[in-house]
Image (cartoon, rainbow, N blue to C red):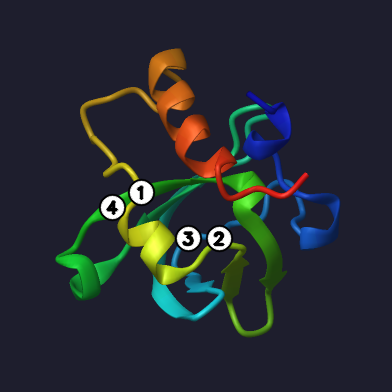
Amino acid sequence: MSDSLWGYQPSSGHIAGSDLTGYSVEATDGSIGKVDKHSDEVGSAYLLVDTGVWIFGKDVLLPAGTVKHIDTEDRKVYVDLTKEQVKDSPEFDRHAQTEDPAYHQQLSAYYMAFRII
């Protein structure tokens, strides 16, 4: 799988070390929740998003490569996914290790289907 999926795109405006916790997350067709946790780790960067009530509080792990833009003034992260794609994504298992290669492979397989490279 492509390592670029697990790193922020240079055009996203992400600055390493920035705290994105609490930022609203916007899909291409509307709001999907808030950043609960994030990682800047090289090759394993992600956003853990609490989707709130619109899909019954499901938590999802979005690879950093899905982030297309970060607006620090409005505290919003824009991802290159639709609400439906996020809704259908694998649910985050709080007992799983975010660094687990098998878990990364499962997520990579799902999200790579939407990438146009």
Q: Which residue is mark 4?
A: 59
Q: Nearer the viewer, mark 4 or mark 3?
A: 4
Q: Residues within 10 Å of mark 1 (few under 14, many from 20)?
A: some
Badge 2 amino acid = Leu
Disc 2 or 1, which lies upstream in sequence?
2
Task: Name which quarter of the figure residue 40 lies in.
Answer: top right
Q: Which residue is mark 2?
A: 20
Left or right of 23 on screen, residue 98: left
Disc 1 or 3, which lies upstream in sequence?
3
Q: Are marks 1 and 3 in contact (CB under 8 Å)?
A: no
Q: Which mark is residue 21?
A: 3
- Give coordinates of residue 31: x percent, y percent: 43, 79
Badge 3 amino acid = Thr
Up-down: is 100 above or below 27? Answer: above
Q: Are marks 3 and 2 in contact (CB under 8 Å)?
A: yes
Distance in Å between CA atoms under marks 1 and 3: 21 Å
Distance in Å between CA atoms under marks 3 and 2: 4 Å
Q: Outermost residue toward the right? A: 10
Q: Secondary structure at mark 4?
A: strand
Disc 4 or 1, which lies upstream in sequence?
4
Q: Secondary structure at mark 3?
A: loop
Q: Residues within 10 Å of mark 3 (few under 14, many from 20)?
A: some
Badge 4 amino acid = Asp
Up-down: is 12 above or below 23? Answer: above
Left or right of 115 on screen, residue 27: left
Question: For the C terminus, which image quadrant?
Answer: top right
Q: Secondary structure at mark 2?
A: loop
Q: Are marks 4 and 1 in contact (CB under 8 Å)?
A: no
Distance in Å between CA atoms under marks 2 and 1: 21 Å
Q: Which mark is residue 41?
A: none
Q: Are marks 4 and 2 in contact (CB under 8 Å)?
A: no
